[in-house]
Image (cartoon, coloured by chain):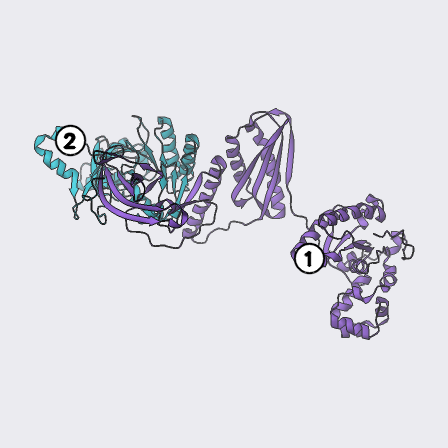
Chain colours: A purple, B cyan
Amino acid sequence: MKEQESTPGLPLIKPSPAAADKIIPLHGRAKQPPPTAAEQTQAPSLWYALHLPQLAELTDKLQQQYLEQLAQLATGVSSSVSFHCCSLVFEVRSSLRYFGGINALHGLLAPRIVKQLQDWNLEPRFRYAASPTVTGSLLLARGDRNLLVHRRDNLRSALGRLSTDVLELNREERRRLYNMGVRRLQDLWRLPTDGLRKRFGSSFVNQLQRALGERPEPQRYYQPPPAFSSSYDLLCEVENVQLLLPVLEEFLAQLVDFLRRRDLSTSRLVVSLIHERQSCTSITMGLRQPSRCRQHLLQLLEIHFNNLAVPAPVIALKMQVVRFDAYLGQSGELLHDSGKTSAGSRRLDLFMEQLQARIGEEPVRKIASVAEHCPEYATSQQDPLLAARRAADHPCTDNPRPLWLLPEPQVLKVCNGKLYHHESLRILSGPERIETRWWSGTDVRRDYYVAQEDNGSRLWIYREKTGDRCWFLHGIFA
Amino acid sequence: MIKPPCCSYIKSPMTTINETHGEFTKTSKTKAYRDEAIGELLTRNPVLWRGCDMSGLGNYGQPTGYPQLDDILPGRGWPHNAIVEIVSQQWGMGELQLLVPLMREIVRQDKWILWISPPYLLNSPALLQAGIDPEQILVINLNTSCKDALWSMEKALQTGSCGLVLAWQNWLPDRVVRRLQLAAETGKTLGVLFQHRISKYSQSFLRLEVKKRNNKKQQRRIGKRCERDQLAANWVETRQGDYCHKTEIVVLKARGNFRPLSVQLNLYPENLPHQQPDRYNNP
């Protein structure tokens, strides 16, 4: 990697006093109109461009991901970072004094970027340049000049040395430029703008004008993903977790404020209770529907805390948001009927959240029916959070089926030619033969009967066709 | 003019009725009107009842699907916002069959049914056969602790998020049932508690017992002459020559009802397919 000081061949244009960049006339009597958008973008700024040609071989998605990670590094020195093709551009003038000049800033950033590139198994090289315009910096970086241009007046000569390859042109345009005898950008400076516009279109001319700072360059800046984390050190050790609720209430107030400002909501939070000399207790709070209602979140947290046992006194608290979601407002219903059902489902959602907060997600299950002959496999228990998926209406058998199935078939006693469960059984109907699952290794060959027990309950029993031909109780009609 | 029935009657029914009594006994027309008004009030309002036999009066209940059972229940059906205790010696005496018409109605209204710690696994084909959509059912597993199960039941009743809450517990103390009863009144939801035994002074709205019809007691009471009739009544011969056993439902307690009542119902479907019971009677 080349440092600009160590390459005497490269033109290094020394910075001039900032006041010389632009002279604002001050007329005592005439009121100055407010600066227009164009003037504001022309305010002295220095754009640092980072060009990584090795990213071009990667997929768009990976490229975007890598650039975003580099942008997170860049946010350490600049607040306005923008993405370009295989490049990042960020403003550094505002932070020059803090970091002690452009060289110090580059010295800070370069090793981090090289390390990041090594982590991704990419060639640890990058091109860079800094100039008062975004497009200018990009072109300079693409030209592999590693230049620093402080003044806008010097841009024309600095850019002039670049080959025309740095411009974003298609093959045909490139060929035409070559045929016109244009090899470097300085050849373009000599040509009339109108003629160029006619031949190559206005976007080509705009690009050149932007590079020279004659045209505003609106940018879309990188927005770092939202992150919320709040912690609080308690004044003394607390054993009763109920006493922590006021602190959490304060956290939630901050969180709701944070979410409202960014128009977000959350569906997963982690609250960590930190103990001394022990790993912390963390509570993961999942919501069925994203929310940012303070009351609702607090209610759920209270339920979580109600049946929480901590192994040691708590010394600090921390709250973190794991997942952010877009905020969807609840709109009122025009007709009463439709409003009723949506309010009902909302109530059920709230109840399910509370239920899962209290007893966990495992024990709450939804029933679904499966097209299967074997009674054990005809019912499936699903996670209720899964979207309600309507099973295809498979034909249901007409043969009697009990409402309850035993988890494991229970062997029935046979005594004096009579079947016994609690009391003696009387077979009412049957048999219904079920032969299935021969492909799975557990061959099912059974004759099912409906039986009446002497105490009044109706049972579903079967006799195995294979093995010992034992009688089993499998279901209760209840 | 007499005032139409309003809230003041409910607050102090006795005094209001007494006042009007003195005033309007003169003409039969006003008397008829008064009786009608009181009658309407008594049939519509489950909070108000006469201090006498109330079974089968009023129409504020949800029909059970068994007309004979409706006849002995106050309000002619299941209450809307209350706890019903169903007692049976063991699970599966027919207590679920008793609730199948109600569950069908609740699923039809697009409401959910919450099953809290049922003793066995639910069988989805049977639910489909009974006309209950299994997608509308939520189950809380059996291995949930009693405390959590009761908490879930109370919350479900309070929030009114489910149409019906069913819970299985061996036995619950009075104050727990009382608390659940209050929760049911708050959320206007029907909760059903299945128990093996109950305390005598439970606060629930309705207490039923499901049992096999006891032959010996009945015979002793009625005498030997009716013995044959009793046996015949106990085993009802159906069309295909099958014998269906009748289950006895006893109203142990109902609000506004003093007399213990019972009814015999045929809970299970009678037409069983391909019946060859005799051939397979001897295993």
Subunit that carries the residue with mark 1: A
A433 up-or-down from B232: above or below = below
Q: Nearer the viewer, residue B22 or B132?
A: B132
Q: Quadrant of residue A193?
A: bottom right
Is A61 placed left or right of A268 in the picture? Answer: right
Residue B218 is marked as 2
Q: What residue is at 69 percent from the left and 52 percent from the top?
A: A66
Coordinates of residue B266 in the picture (x, y in percent):
21, 41
Subunit that carries the residue with mark 2: B
Q: Nearer the viewer, residue B10 or B243?
A: B243
Coordinates of residue A228 in the picture (x, y in percent):
64, 41
Neighbours of disc 2 within 10 Å: few (<14), some (14-19), many (20+): few
Is A99 placed left or right of B72 in the picture? Answer: right
Gap between marks 2 and 1 measured at Cα: 88 Å
Please determine if labels 2 and 1 lie on a single subunit: no
Are the two marked residues, 2 and 1, in contact with CB atoms closer than 8 angstroms? no
Q: Which residue is at the far right?
A: A8
Residue kind at label 1, given as amino acid type:
Leu
Q: Nearer the viewer, residue A8 or B280?
A: B280
Q: Secondary structure at mark 1?
A: loop
Q: Secondary structure at mark 2?
A: helix
Is A61 placed left or right of B150 in the picture? Answer: right
Is any part of residue B60 visible from this angle? no
Residue A68 is marked as none
Residue kind at label 2, given as amino acid type:
Gln
Q: Quadrant of residue A241?
A: top right
Is any part of residue A263 visible from this angle? yes
In the picture, the quarter occupied by the C terminus of chain A is top left
Residue A58 is marked as 1
Coordinates of residue A3 in the picture (x, y in percent):
86, 51
Coordinates of residue B153 in the picture (x, y in percent):
40, 35
Q: Nearer the viewer, mark 2 or mark 1?
A: 1
